[in-house]
Image: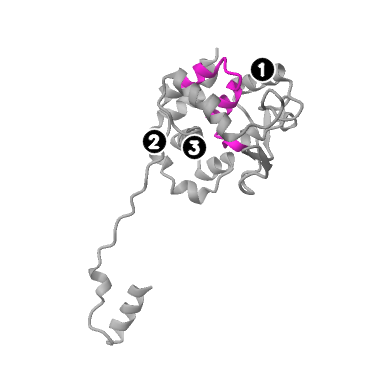
């Protein structure tokens, strides 16, 4: 580094002054992560209750799964007896691939009860042969189709200003961190790298966000 080299040069009396000391380094402005408010999530879930992909949105707002991970879910990934859900693949624009990283391949060991109910109701109605969330012809969703035909209209019905689908993941991450869960635990749950989670700006959000997740079952009563 230039500064350390100049410090050494000053000690050796090769130069009289370390000019790096006169340089004011810019502060790094960390952009705060955008999340839904608890009231917005309530509105989204209420609007999604009778949506054909309602269970997908419930899962997104309670597990923080990525869009591609949700679209890649197959019937065999869900263990109804134990309430576990395996993340084994990801789908992007109809193309099936592996999850984003090694950490992303994981098993969610305990789904919220009403998330389980929403998922099981969907499976019972759709009777998927392979993919849990698929088009009416059984094919994987194109990403733009999901956003334009389902996600954007859902937010409009809910009266919530448009935010990208990934905001669901941000909501879950900030909520869990606000409850005081260790960042390593949250990162493992989300299939995320804790080093990037630390610098993402999640921890500044309000603690009451987690209460919204904990009370999910009550809102579905």
Please provide percent x and percent y for residue 217.
Answer: 55, 18
Question: In this figure, what is the number of numbered marks?
Answer: 3
Circles 2 and 3, Cβ within 8 Å, touching? The answer is no
Please provide percent x and percent y for residue 122.
Answer: 66, 20
| Structural crowding at the residue carrying mark 3, measured as other residues with C-alpha within 10 Å and reported as few (<14), some (14–19) or many (≥20) | many
Q: Is residue 107 above or below residue 22?
A: above
Q: Secondary structure at mark 1?
A: helix
Residue at horizontal 61 percent and vertical 21 percent from the top: 113
Q: Is residue 63 visible?
A: no
Q: Is residue 43 magenta?
A: yes
Start-end of magenta stretch? 42-68
- Whichever of callouts 2 and 3 sits on the residue coming sooner in the sequence is 3
Real-space CA distance between mark 1 and mark 3, rounded to the nearest whole angstrom: 26 Å
Please provide percent x and percent y for residue 193.
Answer: 54, 48
| Structural crowding at the residue carrying mark 1, measured as other residues with C-alpha within 10 Å and reported as few (<14), some (14–19) or many (≥20) | few
Numbered tag placed on residue 65 in the rendering: none
Q: Secondary structure at mark 3?
A: helix
Q: Nearer the viewer, mark 1 or mark 3?
A: 1
Circles 2 and 1, Cβ within 8 Å, touching? The answer is no
Residue 54 appears left or right of 171: right
User: What residue is pinned by disc 3?
Assistant: 173
- Whichever of callouts 1 and 3 sits on the residue coming sooner in the sequence is 1
Q: Nearer the viewer, mark 2 or mark 1?
A: 1
Residue 104 appears left or right of 36: right
Main SS of the magenta segment?
A: helix
Residue 201 appears left or right of 138: left
- Whichever of callouts 2 and 1 sits on the residue coming sooner in the sequence is 1
Please provide percent x and percent y for residue 29.
Answer: 33, 50
User: What residue is pinned by disc 2?
Assistant: 205
Residue at horizontal 66 percent and vertical 43 percent from the top: 105
User: What residue is pinned by disc 1?
Assistant: 121
């Amino acid at each position: 580094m230039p500064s350390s080299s100049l410090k050494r040069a000053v000690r050796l009396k090769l130069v009289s002054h370390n000019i790096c000391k006169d340089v004011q380094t810019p502060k790094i402005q960390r952009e705060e992560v955008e999340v839904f408010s608890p009231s917005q999530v309530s509105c989204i879930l209420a609007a999604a209750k009778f949506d054909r992909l309602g269970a997908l949105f419930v899962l997104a707002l309670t597990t923080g799964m990525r869009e591609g991970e949700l679209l890649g879910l197959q019937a065999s990934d869900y263990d109804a007896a134990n309430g576990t859900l395996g993340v084994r693949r990801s789908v992007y624009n109809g193309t099936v691939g592996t999850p984003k990283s090694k950490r992303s391949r994981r098993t969610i060991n305990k789904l919220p009860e009403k998330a389980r109910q929403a998922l099981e109701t969907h499976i019972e109605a759709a009777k998927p042969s392979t993919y849990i969330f698929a088009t009416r012809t059984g094919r994987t969703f194109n990403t733009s189709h999901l956003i334009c035909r389902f996600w954007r209209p859902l937010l409009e019905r809910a009266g919530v200003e448009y935010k990208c689908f990934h905001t669901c993941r941000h909501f879950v991450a900030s909520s869990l961190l606000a409850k005081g869960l260790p960042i390593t635990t949250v990162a493992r749950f989300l299939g995320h790298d804790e080093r990037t989670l630390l610098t993402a700006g999640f921890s500044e959000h309000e603690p009451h966000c987690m209460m919204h997740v904990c009370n999910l079952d009550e809102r579905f009563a």
